[in-house]
Image: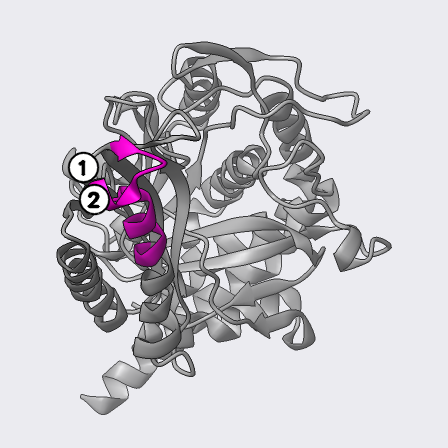
Amino acid sequence: MHKKIISLTLLAFSTLSFAQDKVEDLVSHVEPDVIKWRHHFHEFPELSNREFNTAKYIADYLNSLGFDVQTGVAKTGVIAILDSGKPGPVVALRADMDGLPVKEQSNLPYRSEQMGEYNGNEVPVMHACGHDTHMAMLMGAAKVLSELKGELKGKVKFIFQPAEEGAPAGEAGGAELMVKEGVLKNPDVDAIFGLHISSNADVGTIRYNSGGTMAAVDPFKIVIHGKQAHGAYPWKSVDPVVTAAQMIMSLQTIVSREIKLIDDAAVVTVGSIHGGNRSNIIPDSVELVGTIRTLNSAAREHIYDAMARKVKGIADSMGAKATLTLPLDFSYPITYNDPDLTQSMLPTMQRTAGVENTILSKPVTGAEDFSFFQEKVPGLYVWVGGKPLDVPEEESPAHHTPEFYVDDEGLKLGVELLTNFTLDYMAMH
């Protein structure tokens, strides 16, 4: 029995080695197309749940590869299946599709001049977070894997996801809706892989983390109800402004005094305060809106409990009333890289980028709705460098800004990594 298992394992890795000899050449061959696709997506971005032309462009190409293609998933999403015809696992690869309401400030020949509608207003649209590169890299991986179909064992599910940046007001969307519509079923996905280009990491590098790698997101709203009075006679009021000030300061002590920050970071931010309209009127109410970011479930649960405790306690102490809505309108889970999957794929990352270019990095308090996929199946989400080597990190433009830029040189590594994740996972399972 043991000899049979060993021989099957050796056979799998022998097949893998045979396929791997082709990968670099195939990726190099498709690289000009990947760059062309990236430029097209960048020049013609579309906002969340409005990626109609983007989806058609992707679907037309996937159909040309002979895949089983489904459109209109979670409004504008595109799903494609590559079936090797042989038994094996189902590996999912995901890219996000939407742009942002940002006015591009660049001299690129493929810069965006597009406009779109956001919250009822006409706004400029830009791929200011690199989703154009994600789509192009996944299309490249689809091409390479189609060429390697004979070496595959199982199926590959390509997921092009809309609305990662959040659905428009009053709409559902993104990974959460995709999961609800069964994107991880028929066939059932065994593992999912995703990547994000980074404008701050050098081209040719991979950054990864095991466990909590990007934060859960929990927006909140607090409405404080007091008693209105003339500003000259504050003793006649129940002042919601002073109550709000005390509440804001107290909320900061949840992280600074109640969370064990040597283990995981956490954030409680109040980003909006609304109340009153004149200097000499104490208003009857104040509204606070903010966000919570956590990297493990214990910290998340603690902050939920502490928020309710502090809001009620401070309001009671001031004679006011307060209502806490948490989460407010949406909530993202923790982007959690399955430790076993991460460990098993570490050699893949090291072989693809080089050991010295595969960097264990700290978690970040930004968020990703890839986390909804990881709630259901083991997943791995990594960063691929897009910063030109001659640009100092402190001078690289940030994501979600008009100056955002990543180098086409970073795309090849992403295509190769998605391909190798698929090949290696299939060989191991």
Tell me what residue is drawn at x 39 percent, y 74 percent: 256
Amino acid marked by disc 2? Val
Query: With 160 as the anchor, is 180 left or right in this view?
Result: left
Asked whether residue 168 is in view, the answer is yes
Q: Secondary structure at mark 2?
A: loop
Residue of label 1: 227
Q: Is residue 315 above or below residue 265?
A: above
Amino acid marked by disc 1? Lys
Q: Badge 2, how many Cα within 10 Å: few under 14, some, many 20+?
A: many
Tell me what residue is drawn at x 34 percent, y 27 percent: 78
Residue of label 2: 238
Please state the extent of the stretch shown in magenta in the rendering.
Answer: 229-247
Query: With 74 as the anchor, is 101 left or right in this view?
Result: right
Q: Position of residue 202 (x, y in %)?
A: 72, 58
Tell me what residue is drawn at x 47 percent, y 45 percent: 145
Q: Position of residue 317 (x, y in %)?
A: 16, 60
Residue 241 in magenta stretch: yes
Mark 2 and mark 1 residues within 8 Å of each other at the beta carbon: yes
Q: Is residue 17 above or below residue 367?
A: below
Asked whether residue 370 is in view, the answer is no
Tell which circle, 2 or 1, labels the residue nearer the N-terminal end. Answer: 1
Q: Which residue is more in the foreground, 336 or 94?
A: 336
Q: Which residue is more in the foreground, 290 or 282?
A: 282
Q: Secondary structure at mark 1?
A: loop
Query: With 114 as the anchor, is 395 left or right in this view?
Result: right
Tell me what residue is drawn at x 63 percent, y 46 percent: 27
Q: How many marks?
A: 2
* Quadrant location of the C terminus in the rendered image: bottom left
